[in-house]
Amino acid sequence: GTVKSEPSTTPRAGWASQRERSSLLWLRLMGWIALAAGRRISRALLHPIVLYFVLAAGDVRRHSRAYLDRALGRKAGWRDVYRHLFTFAATLLDRVYLLRGRFDEFEVEASGVEIVMQPFANGEGVLACGAHLGSFEALRMIGHDHGVRVAMIMYEDNARLINATLAAIAPNATLHTIALGRVDAMLSLRRWLDDGGVAGMLADRTLPGPSQRSKSVTLPFLGAPARFPDGPFRLAAMLHRKVVFMAGIYRGGRQYELRFAELADFGAAVADRDAAVRAAVERYVTTLESLCREAPYNWFNFYDFWADADADTSERTAS
């Protein structure tokens, strides 16, 4: 497919914060249920909550079905949409227990963990690029089991929202965040990595607002063009770090599977940084697409993910 880069702009101002607020409202609800009823009863209570959203949230239902049509390779029915939303709700519920350090509630398998552990053994940090797929908090179990410190890189407004929510549901949680947009963000990130930590960020949504350093790359994804930011990979190149793909896939019940795969190693000098960054984005998208087909109900972008790329195509056709 053709690869096109353009400055990262967003036609719908504030969409990122709005969607984060929506997720955090869900998390607050899950937190209240989880702490009041316990995990077994809480999971039973998810069913009527999810059924309500399937019936009442038309936009969410429509976007879920449009994505599942692509990921499943067939027409998605209401049972598929229900399973998609239930998986999302279940991971949010589990997020509460994970943030409170109750790791013994879960069974975890991991593959590719040596990709993270090898640099860690040498005292080096790793940049990890994930997606709104499964549970990022499940990755904290790798830190619990192997002594790896994990931080989340996010924009300052979203970091503030998340920290406020955590204060309510898990006041003793030690969730480290590195807020982009602050003057000391790069220094904090470099120090975290130099101290042998893992810094993770989600790379499947274009970033809000224009940026001189970050561009969006249009690539084929689940059968149609979609836009992905290259900012996380430019960050890795600038810091001369290895970047890995990470995912905490929910397998049902108490089971999670942690996946790691190397995307790029910017530790050595790169002759053509733009080409190396583009190649890393392409590997990221290929890896994400493969996981969306393998575990389709784990991807939680409940909006028209392909809209921006469609709008770009329409504009070029009109001109």
Image (cartoon, rainbow, N blue to C red):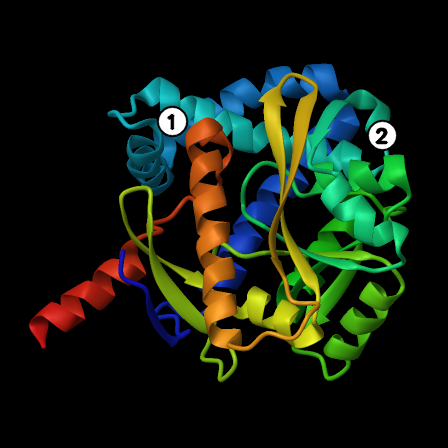
Quadrant location of the C terminus in the rendered image: bottom left
- Say which quarter of the image contains residue 29: top right
83 left or right of 27 in image: left
Q: Which residue occupies the foreground of this view, 135 or 52?
A: 135
Q: Which residue occupies the foreground of this view, 29 or 71?
A: 71
Q: Secondary structure at mark 1?
A: helix
Type of amino acid under label 2: Arg
Type of amino acid under label 1: Val
Q: Residue at x 88, y 39 (%)?
A: 146
Q: Is residue 169 above or below residue 81?
A: below
Q: Is residue 288 above or below residue 269?
A: above
Residue 88 point in image, percent of width and height = 54, 33
Q: Residue at x 74, y 76 (%)?
A: 185
Q: Residue at x 86, y 59 (%)?
A: 196
Q: Is residue 204 above or below residue 190?
A: above
Q: Secondary structure at mark 2?
A: loop
Q: Residue at x 19, y 64 (%)?
A: 313
Q: Tell me, yes or no, if residue 149 can be seen here.
A: no
- Say which quarter of the image contains residue 152: bottom right
Q: Tell me, yes or no, if residue 279 can be seen here.
A: yes
Q: Which residue is mark 1?
A: 81
Residue 120 point in image, percent of width and height = 85, 52
Residue 60 point in image, percent of width and height = 38, 40
Q: Which residue is mark 2?
A: 102
